[in-house]
Amino acid sequence: MASSVVVISVLLYAGFAVMALGSVSLLYPPRFLGIPTRARALAVLAAGLAAALVAVLVPPPPARAGPHGATRLDDFVPEFQFAEFHERLVRATPERVDRALRTVTAEEIRLLRFLTWIRNPRRLWSRQPESILNPPAAEPILDVAKRSGFVVLADEPGRELVLGTLVVRPRDARVSVPDDLAETGRRFAALSAPGYAKAAMNFRIEPRPDGTCRLTTETRIFATDRDAARRFAVYWRMIHPGSALIRAMWLRAVAERAESGR
């Protein structure tokens, strides 16, 4: 399933690139690229547009279930249409990995600020509140996430942390978050009203016999109806390459901090 998302994302961005080439060629047809006329340039533009439309209009995948009971993530998003998974071996104890996970900052995660700028370019010329797409460089990234729309669904120090957020919701929806952790998780898991897509992300620490840890992160998104799934599918296909890279770099930053003893 993950490979199909990669293929569709590649098709989408290839379509954008071909459209850009066709647009420029309408002004200055590059003969050395086999585009000697504006008519040929228009055909290139149309081909790029067709590729991008195909990528956008591919139906979202059906909901599927994960391996039940494997992680706390199953308690909150047992079924999902979209997901990604990353892992890394960390040469540190579970306690050090957990501490690093909770204290790693945006500036330690390579390419994070650049990739979030691509998704949120307005922050260069407008004052925006801090968020996961506009993170302060030196603050723990998890603290920023929890202040900007993510809620803690489960927290087992040294084992697993689960965060959740709504990535699609009706325009007039009002969301209240109770102070009680168990109630927050119960409401999140029970949400099934039409018009929503809920996302949950975990970080799981699994100690190994050799003294190292397997650090994993999985993100699952469940859309509560077909329209919400279609809306999120377009967004997911656009951000998936950057999202996957951010998560891989996030785990790398946690590993480097844990292994250095910071």
Image: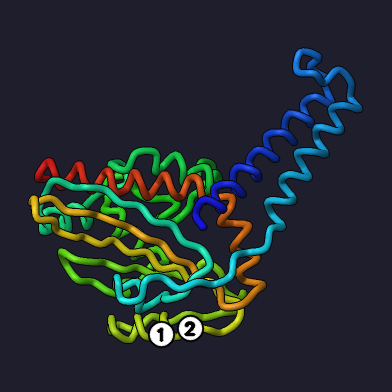
Query: Taking 55 as reference, is 189 above or below it?
Result: below
Report x, y in % for residue 144.
Answer: 33, 58
Q: Is 172 placed above or below 53 here?
A: below
- SS for tag 1? helix
CA distance for labels 1 and 2: 6 Å
Q: Which residue is found at the position 26% from the left and 48% from the top?
A: 88
**In this orientation, does residue 126 appear?**
no
Q: Residues within 10 Å of mark 2 (few under 14, many from 20)?
A: few
Are the residues tagged 1 and 2 within 8 Å (C-beta)? yes
Report the colour scheme. Answer: rainbow
Query: Helix, strand, or loop for circle 2?
Result: loop
Apparent side of residue 260 relative to residue 22 in the rendered image (left or right): left
| Along the line of sight, the residue nearer the viewer: 251 or 140 | 251
Q: Which mark is residue 139?
A: none
Crowd band around label 1 with a 10 angstrom C-alpha radius: few (<14), some (14–19), many (20+): some
- The answer to whether 235 is drawn above or below residue 199 in the figure is above
**Relative image position of residue 7 (x, y in whole percent):** 59, 46
**For residue 193, side relative to residue 256 (left or right):** right
Q: Is residue 189 visible?
A: yes
Q: Residue furthest right?
A: 39
Q: Which mark is residue 191?
A: 2
Which amino acid is tagged 1? Arg
Left or right: 168 with respect to 231?
Answer: left
Q: Tell me residue 140's x, y (percent).
A: 26, 53
Q: Amino acid at mark 2?
A: Leu
x, y percentage for residue 128? 48, 53
Which residue is tagged 1?
187
